[in-house]
Image: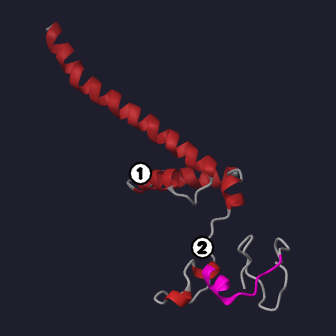
Amino acid sequence: MFCTNCGTRNEPASNYCVQCQALLEKSAATTQNLQTGYNYNQGGYTNYGGYNNQVNTDALEKPITVGEWLITFLLLLIPIANIVLIFVWAFSGTAPKSKSNFFKAQLIIMAIGIGLSIILALFLPLLFFALY
């Protein structure tokens, strides 16, 4: 049985949630909806794992440790994968907010750098030929 308040899995015989101590509902349809986000009575989808798909917001707010940043920057040394990882960490809903905001700012800085490079690549040759 899953808690309707926090989504924690509890023993079927429990009356209160082990995480938040909220009163548990005994409805079978509620338990199935919390497990899969789908009502089994409507037919179709079956979830054999019974996992709760809710995102833990506390994990998204926690600060990134120095070790996690070191691993992050080591992963960014891998060619091509680094570009993919920057986009995943910037726009993924599962990355911590500090990491997500850092990589969004990184993408903005990269876009500015690419824009300035294109402008210089177009106008620097024109300036060079105008002087000679």
- 35 or 89: nearer the viewer: 35
Q: Quadrant of the C terminus?
A: top left
Place residue 6 in its image quadrant: bottom right
Q: Is residue 104 above or below residue 61?
A: above
Counting residues from the start of the chain, the first of labels 2 and 1 encountered is: 2
Q: Residue at x 42, y 57 (%)?
A: 81
Label annotation for residue 47:
none
Q: Position of residue 32 (x, y in %)?
A: 62, 85
Amino acid type of the residue that numbered disc 2 sits on in the rendered structure: Asn
Say left or right for 83 vs 3.
Answer: left
The x, y position of residue 64, in whole percent, is: 68, 51
| SS for dot 2 | loop
Q: Which residues are magenta?
A: 23-33
Q: Nearer the viewer, residue 43 or 103?
A: 43
| Residue at the spot of label 2 | 53
The quadrant of the picture occupied by the N terminus is bottom right
Establish if 130 lies above or below 63. above
Identify the residue shown where x is 32% and y is 29%.
117
Where residue 100 sits in the image (x, y, percent)?
56, 49
Please check the rendered image and state whether residue 29 is part of the magenta-colored stretch, yes or no: yes
Q: Secondary structure at mark 1?
A: helix
Quadrant of the rendered image containing residue 17: bottom right
Left or right side of 77 for 7: right
* Position of residue 9 in the picture relative to residue 128 (left or right): right
Figure label count: 2
- Say what amino acid the circle numbered 1 marks: Ile
Q: According to the image, label 1 marks what residue? A: 83
113 sits left or right of 99 in the view: left
Q: Looking at the image, which is closer to me, 91 or 45? A: 45
Calculate the distance from the C-alpha at mark 2 to the C-alpha at mark 1.
27 Å
Which residue sits at x=63%, y=65%? 55
